[in-house]
């Protein structure tokens, strides 16, 4: 600045620049070094924070998608209701790059309905509720051994724009097998691979957050949002 | 309707590790904070990440709120805004991973100042109106969208030092107006 400022004014202007974040990274670092030991400078910053605060009225509120809260609580609070072994296996499969313990779940398997009277009951019938810890994502899965099909009904939660929910089946210590991406409509019928049908009673189902169209690698790449144990009916 | 006192109370509960208070705080404030992140980043996926990061910081640092004297929404918005600006600049390869919380903790007004700030609320708008149009737009762009001197110089097509001189002068004028 061409005109000379008093040291007090110089500090006040620098405090405003810092509060607004006009400075580049190096300038910010230098300012913060001064800030840590200069009480008057802290006061200057505090004044500017208060001065500018009413401008925040111009930030229009936008409701975030429900999946954000599910991911947040999963990341922060983990999944106390799921056996540790399941989570350690999921962590292993998801690779070392994803350090945070993501995910949540409840294994609440409830017999809700009897099969409809005309439904074939010759094969085994399995039910699983796949839910995030805070119930913001809930999916009911019913596998009918007679047809080899699993009907998947999403009762809560929707994927973030540009992302998809992908459903995985996990048997023992094997890698997860993709059962496909859940469609937006909330109800899907999925043909279960023959190799899984025989062992369906011991399957764990999991839903992960994936790029549009599903995992590009064939293994879960995003946070595991919900898990459910399969039980025979 | 959640009042400032309610939010204040929720933050105090969160500082004690109360998850249900955290959930309520999220429900009460996430839309505003998501709005902040969206305005700064102009990208939904990044704004969602920033919202999550913001609340992780809130969970972690809630115990520092009580001592800083800011109004609760100002504290939350400051964290969200700085987290969003950090993200914006990290993606621009300027790689500044400043600890936003240190910034917030270092900058809290005393309770007396908060009281003064309350009575002065909105004065900033009147004082900004006294600036020339382009200077006002630059200050608003810096606050609302996290634009740096370099961003603003490019946007207004003036040399960096010219932008710096303009804004420094404007900030002094603003301060004079605000403290009159």
Image (tube, rainbow, N blue to C red):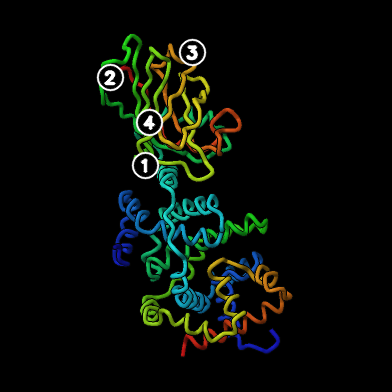
- Dot 4 falls on a residue whose secondary structure is strand
User: Dot 1 corresponds to which residue?
Assistant: A136
First of labels 2, 1 by sequence position: 2
Mark carried by residue A153 = 4
- In percent of width and height, residue B82 lies at 52, 62
Please state the total of marks drawn on the protein image.
4
**Could you say whether the residue bearing mark 3 is in a helix, strand or loop?**
helix
Local crowd size for mark 2, using a 10 Å CA cut-off: few (<14), some (14–19), many (≥20)? few
**In which quadrant of the rendered view does residue A190 lie?**
top left
From the viewer's side, name the closer residue of B101 and A156.
Answer: A156
Asked which secondary structure carries label 2, the reply is loop
Image position, residue A115 (x, y; %) = 28, 19
Q: Earlier in the sequence, mark 1 or mark 4?
A: 1
Disc 3 crowd rating (10 Å Cα; few below 14, some 14-19, many 20+) is few
Q: Quadrant of the N terminus of chain A?
A: bottom right
Q: Which mark is on residue A194? A: 3
User: Viewer-nearest of labels 2 and 4?
Assistant: 2
How far apart, in angstroms, are the residues tagged by discs 2 and 4?
A: 16 Å
A165 shown above or below B95 = above
Question: Where's residue A51, x and y in %?
Answer: 47, 78
Image coords of residue B44 (percent x, y): 53, 52
Mark with earlier residue (2, 3)? 2
Chain under callout 1: A
Mark 2 sits on what residue?
Answer: A116
Give the mark toward the camera: 3 or 4.
4
| Residue at 40% from the left image edge and 37% from the top image edge | A104
Q: Is B69 left or right of A24, judged from the image as shown? A: left
């Amino acid at each position: 600045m061409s005109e000379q400022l008093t040291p007090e004014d110089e500090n006040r202007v620098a405090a405003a620049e810092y509060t607004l974040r006009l400075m580049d990274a190096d300038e910010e670092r230098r300012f913060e070094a001064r800030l840590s030991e200069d009480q008057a400078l802290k006061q200057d910053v505090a004044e500017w924070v208060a001065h500018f605060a009413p401008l925040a009225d111009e930030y229009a509120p936008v409701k975030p998608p429900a999946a954000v809260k599910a991911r947040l609580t999963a990341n922060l609070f983990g999944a106390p209701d799921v056996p540790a072994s399941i989570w350690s296996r999921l962590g292993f499969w998801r690779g070392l790059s994803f350090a945070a313990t993501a995910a949540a779940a409840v294994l609440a398997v409830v017999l809700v309905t009897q099969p409809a009277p005309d439904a074939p009951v010759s094969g085994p019938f399995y039910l699983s509720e796949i839910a995030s810890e805070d119930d913001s994502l809930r999916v009911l899965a019913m596998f009918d051994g007679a047809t080899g099909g699993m009907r998947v009904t999403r009762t809560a939660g929707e994927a973030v724009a540009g992302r998809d929910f992908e459903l995985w089946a996990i048997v023992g210590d094997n890698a997860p097998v993709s059962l496909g991406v859940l469609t937006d409509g909330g109800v899907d019928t999925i043909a279960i691979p023959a190799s899984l049908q025989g062992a369906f009673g011991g399957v764990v189902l999991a839903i992960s957050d994936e790029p549009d169209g599903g995992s590009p690698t064939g293994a879960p790449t995003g946070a595991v949002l919900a898990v459910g144990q399969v039980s025979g009916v | 309707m959640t009042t400032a006192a309610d939010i204040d109370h929720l933050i105090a509960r969160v500082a004690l590790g109360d998850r249900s208070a955290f959930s309520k705080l999220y429900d009460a404030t996430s839309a505003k904070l998501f709005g902040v992140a969206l305005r700064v980043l102009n990208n939904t996926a990044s704004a969602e990440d920033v919202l999550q990061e913001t609340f992780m910081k809130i969970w972690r640092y809630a115990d520092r709120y009580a001592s800083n004297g800011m109004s609760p929404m100002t504290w939350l918005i400051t964290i969200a805004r700085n987290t969003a600006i950090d993200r914006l600049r990290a993606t621009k390869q300027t790689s500044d991973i400043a600890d936003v919380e240190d910034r917030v903790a270092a900058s809290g007004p005393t309770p007396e100042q908060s009281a003064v700030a309350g009575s002065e609320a909105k004065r900033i708008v009147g004082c900004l109106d006294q600036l020339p149009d382009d200077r006002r737009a630059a200050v608003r762009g810096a606050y609302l969208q996290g634009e740096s001197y370099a961003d603003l110089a490019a946007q207004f097509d003036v040399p960096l030092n010219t932008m710096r001189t303009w804004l420094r002068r404007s900030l002094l004028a603003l301060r004079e107006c605000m403290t009159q």
